[in-house]
């Protein structure tokens, strides 16, 4: 369950804060305008505020200003254009088709442009309801702009005043996801959980975690932090250091399960990692309440029990490839990493109580590569005006579906509101088939529940003050659940719209059944058009797989430079790892969407699952190598270790298709003085695993290509 859906955290999440801010702004502006003018003027202003509120998302202040300003200007222009065209039916339909197409083309700019696309479609539908004279159209456009600009000013002031609170909430969300990620790792030690399914779940959660961590970076690392934000910066960096250690805790789960199944070792490891996850969640919980966190777990008993297990293990003698010896080495490595995780948890708690200190990154480093950049070049839009572009086909699909919806609604045997049908189509139709299918189910179920709930409310509640109170609650809940549980948003939106009708047209009792029928019509049309000019996920798989391999090679190269001390800091390593994980998350998301498409359109799902998991393991090996070299830095035989690393990285690069590096001659691995260095055996073992998984990545890539060529 999403953390914001839990009762103990819901009221403290940025989702609820956003919903409360939006509802207060919209209803406040509406009542203020109604007090100063009249109801039609207040409705026009409310429309502007409502459409602009769709762009009110957690973002850095400069980005938020740009996004909301774009929403105000674009939606005001659409409102004016549609209103001016409303008296000529053929002209209105032409404008609707063009606006639907151009608004949907804006999806080329990424996820943050999707609310802008919907806002443009929303105001287009509302403005097309009643014919307007040119003077009325100008007045409507001006009032719409005033409402949008007023809401924008209000939202910017509120967010500026509460910017530290927003950063706390977004950072806490990243910590909650890190706790979930760690909890899934704990499940890998439970033999009742199928390991392949657990690893796939881990990779999926890694994608979500990467997204939340990026949101934290964008808010906390952008600009110079203020003195009162020092603790947030320290917790942010401590979180990423902890994440790297948790990432490195991957070992041979298969080997450990084979050797220690049925004993006390695996449950001990699982319980300890699970306790770590709960401790991370405690830090997030304290962060949402603006309180310093303190350790809530005592790891002493579990660590003592693991120490006893290690003491009882026989001496690691024999063939290093022997499974028993290998399992003992894996167990020792796992316990060492868990100790480091526990130490990092203590640092995380301490960071929440610390004062300002030097930041971990070097002062000269440029943080720009770590941050999301706004790129709204017209060239990106023009480059996608081609038949082969999935976004171009999506824009055509939306324009056709909305046009059919508006025309079809006029044939219904009652006074239909065509915008409701068109709005349903706009809500349901998304760039991917999987997203469309999910929105279709959520919209239908949410609208049905909302209609029934509103019917009950209107039957028992007649006092306008109480109805306005329920309307405010619905207005809060709509944006609150928009990105975490759209079904709840659909319920709230239905209640909101139908209560407005109940308040303004008390005798409009048939409105509930009519809205339900309009939704059904829109759903049928959207379902039909989801198969028109489709863009199936498998068509993008070769490009996404190549992107992962390319990012993987660059990450391995950066890791080699760091571990071989060719660079003075880890900035390039962190940037390369971020880009690698981003590319892996993109592929993983595409795979998830493909599995929701018709079975005839699915390609190489098993091979892709293996490919994503093996790439993830490669990152884990690199993180483990870095920690290993730090742990055994004392008396390290530098030349021999560098030679082993050079040799391993050359083989890994060759497996991944990179230009082979010069291979240094191997030292005598049996040399007594090298073998006496305690890090030599675990280093050799880790390098073998790294080379093995790199070869498996290459094999999986070849298998994916073979499957795609067959079909």
Image (cartoon, helix red, strand yellow):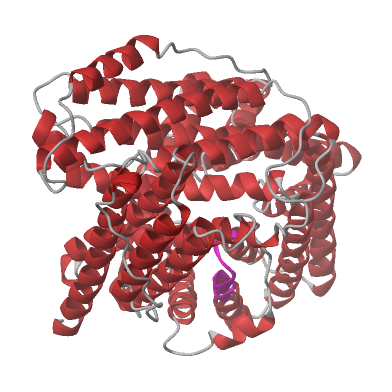
Residue at 28%, 19% (x, y): give it. 306
Residue 123 highlighted magenta (yes or no): no
| Total tally of numbered discs in the picture | 0
Instruction: Work out whether residue 380 can be spotted.
Output: yes
Residue at 63%, 39% (x, y): give it. 237
Quarter of the image holding residue 126?
Answer: bottom right
The reply, left or right, for residue 461 in relation to residue 513 is right
The reply, left or right, for residue 130 in relation to residue 608 is right
Q: In x, y percent, where is residue 31?
A: 80, 36
Q: In x, y percent, where is residue 677?
A: 37, 41
Can you say whether 389 is above or below 431 in the image? below
Can you say whether 174 is above or below 204 in the image? above
The reply, left or right, for residue 181 in relation to residue 60 is left
In front of the other: 373 or 105 = 373
Q: In x, y percent, where is residue 85?
A: 69, 77
Instruction: Give the residues in magenta.
Output: 105-112
In front of the other: 120 or 305 = 305
Q: Which secondary structure dominates the residues rendered in magenta?
A: helix
Quarter of the image holding residue 26?
Answer: top right
Q: In x, y percent, where is residue 247?
A: 41, 43
Residue at 20%, 63% (x, y): give it. 605
In front of the other: 150 or 46 = 150
Residue located farthest toward the bottom when viewing the structure as drawn: 386
Can you say whether 300 is above or below 486 in the image? above
The reply, left or right, for residue 301 in relation to residue 477 is left
Instruction: Work out whether residue 188 can be spotted.
Output: no
Residue at 55%, 73% (x, y): give it. 108
């Amino acid at each position: 369950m999403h953390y914001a859906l839990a009762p103990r955290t819901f009221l403290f999440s940025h989702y609820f804060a956003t919903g409360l801010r939006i509802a207060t702004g919209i209803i406040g502006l509406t009542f203020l305008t109604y007090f100063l003018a009249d109801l039609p003027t207040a409705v026009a202003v409310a429309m502007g505020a409502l459409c602009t509120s769709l762009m009110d998302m957690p973002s850095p202040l400069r980005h938020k200003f740009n996004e909301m300003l774009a929403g105000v200007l674009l939606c005001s222009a659409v409102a004016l254009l549609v209103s001016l065209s409303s008296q000529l039916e053929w002209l209105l339909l032409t404008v609707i088709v063009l606006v639907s197409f151009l608004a949907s083309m804006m999806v080329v700019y990424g996820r943050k442009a999707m609310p802008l696309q919907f806002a443009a479609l929303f105001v287009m539908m509302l403005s097309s309801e009643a014919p307007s004279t040119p003077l009325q159209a100008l007045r409507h456009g001006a009032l719409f702009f005033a409402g949008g600009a007023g809401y924008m000013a209000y939202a910017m002031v509120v967010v500026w005043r509460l910017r530290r609170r927003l950063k706390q909430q977004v950072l806490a969300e990243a910590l909650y996801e890190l706790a979930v990620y760690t909890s899934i790792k704990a499940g890998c030690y439970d033999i009742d959980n199928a390991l392949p399914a657990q690893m796939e779940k881990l990779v999926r959660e890694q994608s979500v975690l990467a997204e939340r961590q990026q949101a934290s970076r964008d808010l906390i690392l952008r600009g110079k932090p203020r003195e009162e934000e020092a603790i947030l910066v320290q917790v942010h960096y401590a979180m990423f250091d902890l994440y790297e250690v948790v990432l490195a805790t991957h070992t041979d789960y298969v080997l450990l399960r084979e050797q220690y199944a049925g004993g006390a070792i695996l449950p001990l490891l699982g319980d300890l990692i699970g306790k770590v996850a709960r401790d991370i969640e405690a830090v997030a919980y304290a962060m949402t309440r603006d309180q310093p966190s303190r350790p809530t777990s005592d790891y002493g008993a579990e660590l003592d029990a693991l120490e006893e297990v290690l003491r009882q293990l026989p001496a690691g003698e024999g063939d290093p490839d022997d499974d028993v010896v290998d399992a003992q080495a894996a167990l020792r490595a796992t316990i060492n990493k868990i100790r480091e995780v526990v130490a990092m948890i203590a640092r995380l708690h301490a960071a929440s109580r610390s004062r300002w200190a030097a930041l971990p990154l070097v002062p000269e480093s440029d943080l720009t590569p770590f941050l999301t950049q706004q790129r709204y070049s017209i060239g990106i839009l023009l480059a996608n005006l081609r038949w082969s572009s999935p976004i171009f086909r999506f824009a055509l699909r939306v324009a056709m579906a909305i046009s059919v919806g508006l025309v079809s609604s006029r044939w219904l045997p009652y006074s239909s509101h065509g915008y409701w049908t068109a709005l349903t189509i706009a809500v349901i139709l998304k760039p991917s088939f999987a997203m469309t299918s999910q929105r279709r189910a959520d919209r239908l179920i949410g609208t049905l529940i909302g209609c029934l709930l509103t019917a009950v409310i209107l039957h028992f509640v007649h006092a306008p003050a109480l109805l306005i109170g329920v309307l405010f609650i619905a207005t809060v809940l709509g944006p609150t659940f928009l990105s975490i549980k759209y079904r709840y948003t659909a319920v709230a939106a239905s209640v909101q719209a139908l209560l407005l009708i109940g308040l303004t047209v008390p005798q409009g009792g048939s409105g509930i059944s009519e809205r339900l029928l309009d939704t059904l019509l829109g759903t049928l049309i959207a379902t039909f058009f989801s198969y028109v000019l489709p863009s199936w996920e498998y068509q993008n798989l070769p490009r996404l797989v190549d992107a992962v391999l390319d990012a993987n090679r660059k990450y391995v190269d950066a890791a080699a430079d760091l571990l071989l001390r060719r660079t003075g800091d880890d900035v390039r390593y962190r940037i390369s790892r971020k880009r690698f994980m981003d590319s892996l998350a993109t592929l993983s998301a595409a795979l998830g969407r493909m599995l929701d498409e018709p079975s005839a359109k699915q390609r190489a799902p098993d091979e892709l699952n293996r490919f994503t998991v093996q790439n993830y393991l490669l990152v884990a090996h690199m993180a483990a190598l870095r920690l290993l070299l730090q742990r055994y830095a004392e008396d390290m035989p530098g030349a021999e270790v560098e030679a082993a690393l050079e040799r391993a990285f050359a083989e890994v690069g060759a497996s991944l298709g990179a230009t082979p590096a010069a291979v240094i001659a191997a030292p005598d691995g049996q040399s007594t003085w090298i073998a006496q260095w305690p890090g030599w055996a675990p280093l050799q073992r880790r390098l073998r695993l790294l080379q093995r998984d790199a070869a498996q990545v290459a094999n999986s890539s070849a298998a994916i290509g073979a499957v795609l060529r067959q079909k």
